[in-house]
Image (cartoon, rainbow, N blue to C red):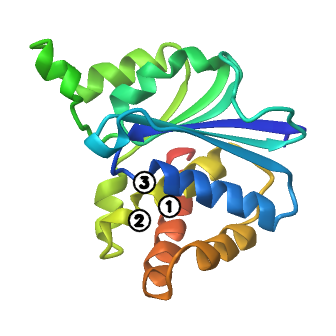
Amino acid sequence: MKMQSNVVICGVGGQGVLTAGKLLSTAALSEGIQVVMSEIHGLAQRGGAVSVDVRIGNVLGPIVPDGKGDLIIAMEPLEALRVLHRSSRESVFVVNTQKIPPVSLGIAHREYPSIESLVSDLKRRRTVFTVNALELARKTGELRTASTIMVSMASALYDTGITDESFLNAIKRLFPLRYQKANIEAFDLGRKEAAAVVK
């Protein structure tokens, strides 16, 4: 792990972007690592773009500077392209393939591009891993665990210096008891998915 890690989590309102940021931040704190989290809501309550910056380690401010994002966790594919300028050529992208067309596309009478073309475009420029987090979340019986799956997979593919134990402690702190089992299962699924894509 570097002295600091800059993580950008993006998606649309309702996908658990803020929850993902809180999980990553709480896990870092459980590890005793300095962390700063900032939220950029946009029109989150209407399904609009929302992003969270999580800066881990020796950092001076809450916002990840453009071009300095080390890890991009994209809950929605088109949003991954929207934050491309915040990454560098060395950045790792973990992208959920569940598409949620933004209202702006309908207003402009434009069609959502194919997931294949979006991912192909990203892969020409960055290191990209994809996952259908919603389908994996169905296995837990709780669709809202998709954000936990994304954080788990991403933190396995990019070393944040946070142990599994700290993530599990964070799950127990963040989620009510009735949701803990599903989120622990989701964390395990994310780890297994990460191991599968790097084989």
Q: Which mark is residue 66?
A: none
Is residue 92 found left or right of 135 in the rendered image?
right
Upstream in sequence: badge 2 or badge 3: 3
192, 187: nearer the viewer: 187
Q: Earlier in the sequence, mark 3 or mark 1?
A: 3
Callout 1 touching callout 2 (CB < 8 Å): yes
Pointer 1 local density, CA inside 10 Å: few below 14, some 14–19, many at least 20: many
* Residue at the spot of label 3: 16
Q: Are marks 2 and 3 in contact (CB under 8 Å)?
A: no
Residue type, mark 3 in image: Gly
Considering the numbered disc 3 on the image, is that residue within a helix, a strand or a loop? loop
Question: Nearest the camera: 123 or 26?
Answer: 26
Label 2 to label 3, Cα distance in Å? 8 Å
In which quadrant will I find the N terminus? Answer: top right
**Alpha carbon distance from label 3 to label 1:** 9 Å
Q: Residue at x 36, y 37 (%)?
A: 76
Q: Mark 2 points at which residue?
A: 145
Q: Helix or strand or loop: what does disc 1 sit on?
A: helix
Q: Name the residue under label 1.
A: 148
Residue 196 visible: no
Pinpoint residue 96: horizontal percent, then vertical percent: 39, 43
Residue 106 spot, x, y in % from top left: 12, 22
Residue drawn at x 67%, y 16% is 67
**Relative to 172, is 104 above or below?**
above
Give above or below for 187 relative to 129.
below
Whether residues under marks 3 and 1 lie with C-beta atoms below 8 angstroms apart, the answer is no
Q: Which residue lies furthest to the bottom in this view?
A: 177
Residue at the spot 84% in from the left edge and 37% down from the top edge = 4
